[in-house]
Amino acid sequence: MKVRKGKLLCVGLICLDVVTTCKEFPVEDTLQRTESVSWQKGGNAANTSAVLGILGDEVDFMGSLPQSASDFSSKLMTSFVKAEMEDCGVGMQNVVNFTDKSLPFSCVILNKTKGSRTILHNNEGVTEPTFEDICRLNLDEYSWIHFEGRNIPEVLKMLDHVTAYNQKHPDEQIILSVDLERPNRKNIEQLIPYVDVLLVGRDFALGKGIQSAMEAVEHYRTVAKKRAYVVCPWGDTGAASGVAGAVDDVILTPAVPPDHVIDTLGAGDTFLGALIHSLRLERPLDDAVGYACAVAGFKCGHQGYKCLQ
Ligand code: ADP
Ligand code: FRU
């Protein structure tokens, strides 16, 4: 895949994650001591851009932050997540300010015995970036724009806007990628024909009645844009990948398990960051997926994302 020079942009959610590690999953209405607790920034697009920043890419994030929030806790949480993103090298100048609500928030339980992560998420009234926000950008600065598949009507308009730009720059196109994460987002599949790299999440695929990563890629490469890369990560199985409209087989790349699974929160976001990093270096798809599995597997063996720094 040919990628022009320029920055990356990830559009989507940023939130605060409060992560608690337990020996076992708690029993309702009991008190249990936990092994550790930490705060970190979260949200798919925020995590993916942070991984890209850590891997050395020049990357900006676009999402909503209540930067002028009046209540103390919102102010504190917002400056914390913003500082963490900047520490990972992510440009935060395209953040959209919203004033009325607090920062989206997740309580996460990591179960040490099973290696599972349970997320309780609240994003009540979050204001998503809009078409007008992307119109303010100078697209000449970017080589790749990734959209977390949220707020579908606005994302469709944003994709139209970048596609119109691409039509005027046939030899220097901006690469577009989308993450299909949740099956319940209405009309999310309308994003598929626009993109050069399509991520099909396991939860999304399961929600569509698909039972494996291979099956997901076989199906979605029949509906994706010709020559688009279609990739489906599937937990400790690894990830399947294939090219739309090609006759080559879909490939299953095995996961790279750590000695001990410590923290699988954001494994998919890490996988995606490493995949984009590698594809941007114009590596072949199977190499890029192998690298993404290695980076995501390594992260699963450590708490948080600092291990990648
Ligand atoms: P999500 O965080 O979106 O649920 P997945 O669980 O599908 O994402 O994981 C994404 C990628 O992370 C997988 O393709 C795999 O490479 C890696 N991964 C996830 N869980 C493990 C694990 N237990 N051991 C090794 N690698 C893992
Ligand atoms: C992990 C994650 C967390 C966040 C949640 C939001 O993929 O981005 O950081 O709390 O998902 O859905």
Image (tube, rainbow, N blue to C red):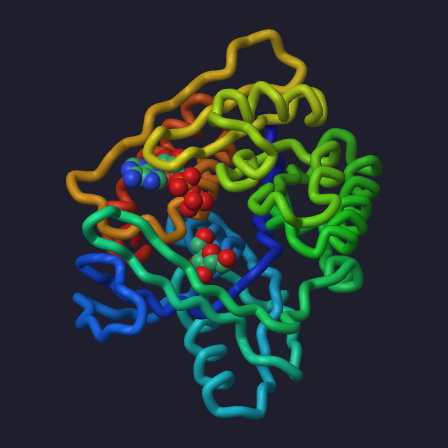
On screen, residue 150 versus residue 289, left or right, reads: right
| Closer to the camera in the image, 72 or 237 | 237
| Closer to the camera in the image, 191 or 119 | 119
Q: Position of residue 297 (x, y in %)?
A: 30, 39
Q: Is residue 275 above or below residue 79?
A: above
Q: Is residue 80 above or below residue 53?
A: below
| Closer to the camera in the image, 248 or 175 | 248
Quarter containing ligand 1?
top left
Residue at position x 53%, y 91% in the image: 71
Q: Is residue 19 above or below residue 207?
A: below
| Closer to the camera in the image, 296 or 262 | 262
Residue at position x 62%, y 42% in the image: 178
Q: Is residue 189 visible?
A: yes
Q: Position of residue 56 (x, y in %)?
A: 41, 49
Residue 102 sits in quarter = bottom right
Residue at position x 66%, y 83% in the image: 100
